Amino acid sequence: MTAEKNRGPDNLVILCIEHSYEIDEKPDMFPAEMLRRWKAAQIAEYDKILRSWSISDDEATEALIASEAFETLRAPSTLELVRRVEALRLLAERTRSDARRWARRWQQLRERTHNSSSMWDEDGNTIYLEPSESEVRPIREGIQAALEAAINDLGPAADAARVELAAIRVTSAQISPWCDDLNGAIIALMDTAGSWAGGSNPTLDTAFDQTLENLQRSVNELVRASRGEDVERPASPSIVEPPSVTDPLAQHRTLLDEARPFSRVTHRLYDPDLRERIAEATLTASEIPPTVHFLAISLDVTAALAAAVARNATKEEKLELMNRDRQRLPICAATALLQQAARGDSEGNFLAVAASESLRRLWWDTDWSSETSWVGNDVNGQSMMWAFANAMSDSELRMRLGQVLENSPQLLTQLVVSCAGWVEELDSSTWQLKQFERRYSEIPPWLPIEEIRALSVRLLGNHQSPDDLTTLAAILRHSADESKY
């Protein structure tokens, strides 16, 4: 391809700086056909915008005013709005009953469990047993399913009510405050219908009932205002300034961009200050999931850039860096730096041995039975364990982690979550990140799966599976559920 064609519009794909770096540095992950699809999607979106509504809202309003008298339009629109709002209110009451039925089951289960045993503490106070996780989980799932079904059912009814509300709004500017109040009441109802704050006691679900009362009051006041009656003007909704959209990792990205030239050439002089700042940035990178979307700023890339900056340091300086890096926290940051320390170096054999020895010392010096040793390692724990396994052996890790679970079974969930991998879901049309989650696609050879299987019986109860991957997935779900309630 000639230079002129290379820079021509037919070969242009508009991208952000970060992803342009990823494509240039990882061409195998972004084939030409994928880039052509991206460009076609961009052009299709532009064409769709051009074909959209061709007149402004003001022009549409002027046409409506010229064709009808608003006084004759308002009365039937108001009646239809009342019907729509009442239908929404009745439907909301019916759909809420499903979640409340599940809550009553939860309440009855707790009462049965409380009455099943009589115990007391050393001061004579009664101690009540609580239902097991395996008993409560189906109820929580039932409440969540009922809430999701309610939102799906209420959505069309809420949209229909807001359509009628929009029709009334254009008939008179004087009733706009009451229209705004009713619109807010509809939105509040939808928000409340999708949440549950009552726990196991359905009588505590008072926020939902209050929202229904507010909806009824709001529509009644709007009807009175549209008739010209003297109605107290609703309070103006507080204007909440939308938070400025900032990239929480902008500073981290800027720092890594400062170091990237060191990874592209080999002649740059060692910069001790920059290397220290990059090494300190591994603390930030340790909280970034190692997925494709964050590839350019991940912990491994951050550690690799630290090694690139120190490429031309002396042997003594590199050994001193290893000693300092071994003391860094969280431990996953230390392992990432040590793993990258000797790569691509002319004295690689000597430094590789030193780095591996530092990793082994770090592994054996760490008390993995202590919860504090796992702090900060939950996001990049799997890559940390792979680094240790590469420095020693899978069997050494598996044996010691198994001993950890035998001596500290309360660390089961922490260990399983920390050692899980990550998967991400992208929007198929925009390629924007939708969500990411923990998952085991395979069992790492260093994972103490036998000890995990044994302890999972107590944690999961009847939800335990004979398949190890399914058991690991169930523990991950248990951890996610615990963080919700």
Image (tube, helix red, strand yellow):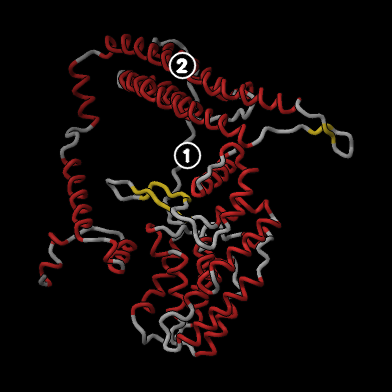
Q: Is residue 301 left or right of residue 5?
A: right
Disc number at residue 16? none
Residue 184 seen: no
Q: Position of residue 230 (x, y in %)?
A: 47, 12
The alpha-carbon separation of the residues under discs 2 and 1 comes to 27 Å
Q: Is residue 94 above or below residue 414?
A: above
Residue 104 seen: yes
Q: Is residue 467 left or right of residue 157?
A: right
Q: Position of residue 2 (x, y in %)?
A: 10, 72
- The residue at the point 46 percent across, 16 percent down is 89
Residue toward you, 100 or 156: 100
- Secondary structure beneath disc 2? helix
Disc number at residue 240? 1
Q: Is residue 484 left or right of residue 77?
A: right
Disc 2 or disc 1, which is closer to the eye?
2
**Mark 2, residues whose alpha carbon is within 10 Å: few (<14), some, or many (≥20)?**
many
Q: Quadrant of residue 79?
A: top left
Disc number at residue 89? 2
Quarter of the C terminus within the rendering: top right
In the rendered structure, which disc, 2 or 1, sits on the residue that comes first in sequence? 2
- The residue at the point 43 percent across, 56 percent down is 247
- Mark 1: amino acid: Val
- Mark 2: amino acid: Arg
Looking at this rendering, what residue extends furthest in the right direction? 123
Residue toward you, 349 or 466: 466
Q: Position of residue 228 (x, y in %)?
A: 40, 11
Q: Is residue 112 left or right of residue 339?
A: right
- The residue at the point 37 percent across, 77 percent down is 263
Quarter of the N terminus within the rendering: bottom left
Q: Quadrant of residue 222?
A: top left
Residue toward you, 472 or 288: 472
